[in-house]
Image (cartoon, rainbow, N blue to C red):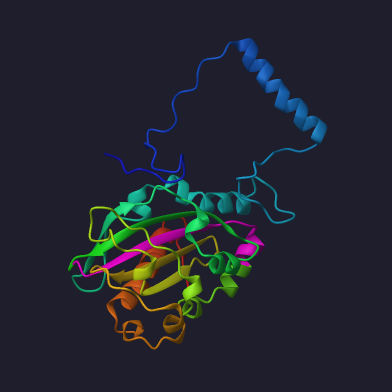
Amino acid sequence: MESQAFGADGGFPDTAGLPPRPRRSPGRVIAAALVPLVALAVAGVGFALSGGSPSYEAGAKPGSGAAAADVAARAVWRSAGADRILPAKIDREGTESYYRLAVDPDESCAHLPAAFIKALGAAGCTHVVRATYLDSTESVVATVGLVAVGGTGAQRTALFQDWTADSYARQYSMMPSTYPVRSTLAASFGDAQRIAWKSAISNDGSYIAFSVAGFADGRLGPSAAAFDLGNDSELQSDSPPVQVADDLSASTLSTFSALYSPNGAHS
């Protein structure tokens, strides 16, 4: 079975694509073709982009190499299969592996807190795809996500330059919400169980990967005050959730960036 794809109907449509279009009579086809041609002639433009399509910098010409590359890069989250964006298994150093429990069909940016949205600045968020994983020892769970960034090329470049992953990882208000999965060890993995998080941004500013980790036994995470101070023992660098959050965010972005760029570096 082919992997499913993100980006349509809030879930995972079949890769077979949309149903065939109904046949139309030649008269209707000609009439339908004339309407947009007349409209374009009056408006004096060559193309009309929908509000949900990527925007361009001033002076960029739709159809140019740079614009086409930009559109292609920012459409990967929609066209790539789910198993390529958030694979069923993620291997860490040594023999440790993480197994995907479920993918969230809701791609809303509402999964991100207000502080995270604010940090995105003018670029903003268009979609969030995420899934929850369990490690092979069944001790740590993590919600891993990919944020599709909006805005112009200039705005995304500015975001890349301003994004400070290490600093943000120490701010409780920036931490995305979790995705609990019913009937699994992650069923109780709610926001109160979050212990650590980390992010990584693609070098073109088009995507941000993040991972929010906690323990599978459902123990509570640190309070907002303790998190920001970083004085809780579970927030130290050798804590499993801290290591997992760092590794999975970097791994997710690296794997995803390779889908559309041979130089998908991140910070």
Picture coordinates of residue 196, whole percent (x, y):
38, 75
Residue in the picture at 61% in, 50% down = 54
Height in image: 157 above or below 40? Answer: below
Residue in the picture at 73% in, 38% down = 46
Height in image: 221 above or below 86? Answer: below
In-image side of 32 versus 91 (left or right): right
Picture coordinates of residue 189, whole percent (x, y):
31, 63
* Nearer the observer, 220 or 214: 220
Q: How many marks?
A: 0
Magenta highlight on residue 143: yes
Height in image: 130 above or below 239? Answer: above
In-image side of 74 versus 158 (left or right): left
* Nearer the observer, 146 or 75: 146
For residue 195, what is the image quadrant? bottom left
Height in image: 164 above or below 249? Answer: below
Magenta highlight on residue 110: no
Picture coordinates of residue 255, whole percent (x, y):
37, 61
Looking at the rendering, the stretch of residues picked out in magenta corresponds to: 138-157
Picture coordinates of residue 219, whole percent (x, y):
28, 72
**Which image quarter is the N terminus in?**
top left
For residue 57, what is the image quadrant? bottom right
Residue in the picture at 60% in, 60% down = 124
In-image side of 108 versus 144 (left or right): right
* Nearer the observer, 53 or 266: 53
